[in-house]
Amino acid sequence: MMTPSQIAAAAVEIVRSALPYSSELLEQCTSLELPHIMANGDIYGPAPDNAAAFMQYGADWTGLAVSSRCGGTSYWLYYRCQLTQERAMACLGPQQSVGAAIEAAVQHVRADLEYWNSKRAAA
């Protein structure tokens, strides 16, 4: 069973490990500079070896992405579940900035960890 401080630290580490760059660097970006989720669910973003070229990311990609629907932008986190190591996704909704989206991602992952930790404790 994890303590609240262990859960908080694990949430930060899970989000940090999902991001391709440091939070400090990503916080300087706008939503337009992040990978974009298309209507069919495919994710496109800058190629790792050439930021001027766009490419489709594979099913194992993790990171922060955005989607646009009806003029609104929502942030999403794709990350690895701590329990199953499967890719998970979290809708972070509209956020004021990339930094706010990263903080929302940490809070979302923390809530997930708290939930699953409580289920394991009850078992």
Image (spheres, helix red, strand yellow):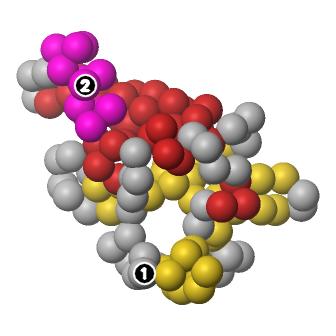
Residue 65's tag is none
Please name the residue shown 54% across and 86% down the image.
Answer: 55
Q: Is residue 108 visible?
A: no
Residue 85 appears left or right of 95? left
Q: Secondary structure at mark 1?
A: loop
**Above/below status of 80 relative to 8:** below
Residue 24 appears left or right of 83? right
Overall secondary structure of the magenta stretch? Answer: helix
Please name the residue shown 38% across and 36% down the image.
Answer: 109
* CA distance separating discs 1 and 2: 31 Å
In the rendered view of the protein, which quadrant contains the N terminus?
top left
Residue 9's tag is 2
Q: In this picture, which residue range is highlighted in magenta? A: 3-13
Q: Is residue 110 visible?
A: yes
Q: Label 1 amino acid?
A: Asp
Query: Most extreme residue toward the right, as rendered?
Result: 71
Q: Earlier in the sequence, mark 1 or mark 2?
A: 2
Residue 18: % across, % down: 35, 53
The quarter of the picture where residue 63 lies is bottom left
In the rendered view of the protein, which quadrant contains the C terminus?
top left
Q: Nearer the viewer, mark 1 or mark 2?
A: 1
Q: Label 2 amino acid?
A: Ala
Label 1 neighbourhood size at 10 Å, few (<14), some (14-19), many (20+)?
few
Residue 21: % across, % down: 41, 53
> In the depicted view, which residue is nearer to us: 61 or 41?
61
For label 1, the residue is 49
In reply to whether residue 89 is colored magenta, the answer given is no
Residue 39: % across, % down: 71, 76
Please name the residue shown 38% across and 70% down the image.
Answer: 61
How many numbered marks have been drawn onto this rendered protein structure?
A: 2
In reply to whether residue 8 is colored magenta, the answer given is yes
